[in-house]
Amino acid sequence: MTAFPNMNQFAEFLQQFNEESSRGVVLTSAAYLDTILENTLLAFLIEDHASEMLVSEGNAPLQTFGGRIRACYALGLIREVDYQVLDIVRRIRNEFAHNWRRASFNNQQVRDLINNLPSIGHDELDNDPDARYKMNIAQMMLSLERNVDRIRANRRQRA
């Protein structure tokens, strides 16, 4: 198992991430996390087209970000703290995706959600919603990517 199997992809993401507007940061980070959750579920389930149909194809039951968050938690694939952070990210993503006029890290509703993210441990960063969001996202991505490798090593087998 490697420390971070997709380091080149992650480095590419971070470069793009740092060039984005606030809306771009939120939408691209949620999309990236959604992909990691998809990979987590596919790494856990048996290697079969039925698994892909459940997670990825058409109107798959586990195709939404929220559905994947809940499924990963309910199956014991992510920790409770991951579940809580991912749900906050999902809610922030929804604010940016559906409220075009007031979507910003300075919006009080978004700030309140960001304040529910774990502390970074540095007052200056904790009080900057943009920095707090980005640091939590980076930590979450690294943690979840490492988790996919561990889960794949223990993939479910056909009965």
Image (cartoon, rainbow, N blue to C red):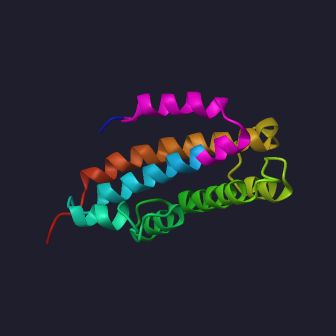
Count all numbered tags in the image, as a single digit.
0
User: Quick one: quadrant of the N terminus?
Assistant: top left
Q: State left or right for residue 118 relative to residue 30.
A: right
25 or 80: nearer the eye?
Answer: 25
User: Quick one: quadrant of the C terminus?
Assistant: bottom left
Q: Position of residue 118 (x, y in %)?
A: 68, 51
95 or 155: nearer the eye?
Answer: 95
Q: State left or right for residue 46 relative to residue 105.
A: left
24 or 111: nearer the eye?
Answer: 24
Residue positioned 61% across, 59% down in the render = 90
Residue positioned 79% across, 47% down in the render = 105
Asked if the magenta segment contains residue 31, the reply would be no
Do we see residue 121 in this rendering? Answer: no
- Position of 45 relative to 18 (above/below): below
Q: Position of residue 82 (x, y in %)?
A: 54, 57
Q: Which residues are magenta?
A: 3-27
- Position of 75 relative to 39 (above/below): below
Q: Position of residue 106 (x, y in %)?
A: 84, 47
